[in-house]
Image: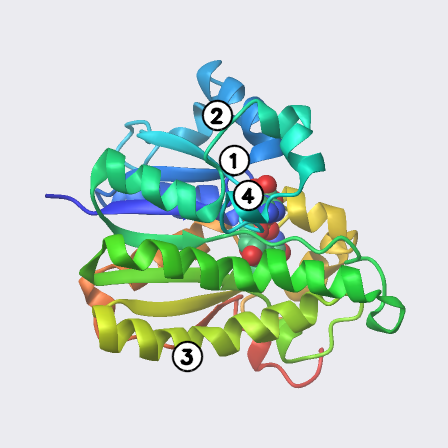
Amino acid sequence: RGKRAFIAGVADDNGYGWAIAKSLAAAGAEILLGTWVPALNIFESSLRRGKFDESRVLPDGSLMEITKVYPLDAVFDNLEDVPEDIKANKRYAGSSKWTVQEVAESVKNDFGSIDILVHSLANGPEVTKPLLETSRNGYLAAISASSYSYVSLLKHFIPIMNPGGSSISLTYIASERIIPGYGGGMSSAKAALESDTRVLAFEAGRKHKVRVNAISAGPLRSRAAKAIGFIDMMIDYSIVNAPLQKELSADEVGNTAAFLASPLASAITGAVIYVDNGLNAMGVGV
Ligand code: NAD
């Protein structure tokens, strides 16, 4: 049978999660999505109304099928974690079973197992603030939504991942080099995510024969990136300075994810793979 993938962090057709879903679908995988609760209604209605049909087209001309969309908020592990104001919030009260543990249980009940887990989500409420001006709460929120969310997803999904399975997250070079403007503790959150990629690769590999890798992606004009505020400048900078002077397409990241999820990558784990037109290799801009 074909492989089954759960992709967390898709709420429109502009981001890396959508492109990864398409590349996996093109390679024959069944697609399950986890969509942030507050974005769920608009995403599902747009999907139903055909708003994404043009971007659902796969290389063979068929449309990507999405088998099921699960509501998800990856900052909550289980119901006991959810504060009253969130429970009472209209957008959250309209859905149920959206904590990480409950989503993993639902996927298990619906499908039994998965082969591929993708984490394509991040959030840093103070991302536009320099680190020196970031509050403790803002910093911890960035880590919770962008780093621990991955530990939690893998922890809850790994019992239903088939041996030989593959898990992928998305990171950014601000974890290891100074990128002014990527603030609020987001650079710290990506550093944690990359370090965790190695430790999780060891634990998941030994215990479950599951591979764990991260893709360090170049700049893409996604919804999340537009909220940071400097994305056009980063895209221009890359086109001027990278070894490959072209705009990065989300599909190039999607295709790398499909490779990492496939048996072609059966010895790759604990790695951070750059998909950035080579910009990471430059020492100075020219
Ligand atoms: P995106 O907006 O398409 O994806 C981010 C998603 O995270 C959104 O769908 C949002 O709804 C979801 N989300 C936020 N908080 C959540 C929560 N608590 N629970 C569940 N979902 C939540 O933007 P993107 O840029 O494609 O981001 C995907 C990943 O790629 C992120 O990890 C991001 O840091 C990484 N990345 C992006 C770029 C870039 O330039 N766009 C570069 C390198 C890495």
- Tell me if label 4 and label 2 are in contact, CB under 8 Å: no
The three-letter amino acid code for the residue at tag 1 is Asp
- Tell me if label 2 and label 1 are in contact, CB under 8 Å: yes
Disc 1 crowd rating (10 Å Cα; few below 14, some 14-19, many 20+) is many
Q: Which mark is residue 52?
A: 2
For marks 4 and 2, give the CA distance.
Answer: 23 Å
Question: Residue reaching furthest left?
Answer: 1
Q: Nearer the viewer, residue 57 or 121?
A: 121
The three-letter amino acid code for the residue at tag 2 is Phe
Q: Which mark is residue 111?
A: none
Considering only order in the chain, which callout, 1 or 3, is on the residue closer to the N terminus?
1
Task: Name which quarter of the figure residue 199 lies in.
Answer: bottom left
Q: Which mark is residue 199?
A: 3
Considering only order in the chain, which callout, 1 or 2, is on the residue closer to the N terminus?
1
Question: Which residue corresponds to mark 1?
Answer: 13
**In the image, residue 97 above or below residue 179:** above
Considering only order in the chain, which callout, 3 or 4, is on the residue closer to the N terminus?
4
Question: Which residue corresponds to mark 4?
Answer: 73
For marks 3 and 2, give the CA distance.
Answer: 37 Å
> Relative to 46, is 270 on the left or the right?
left
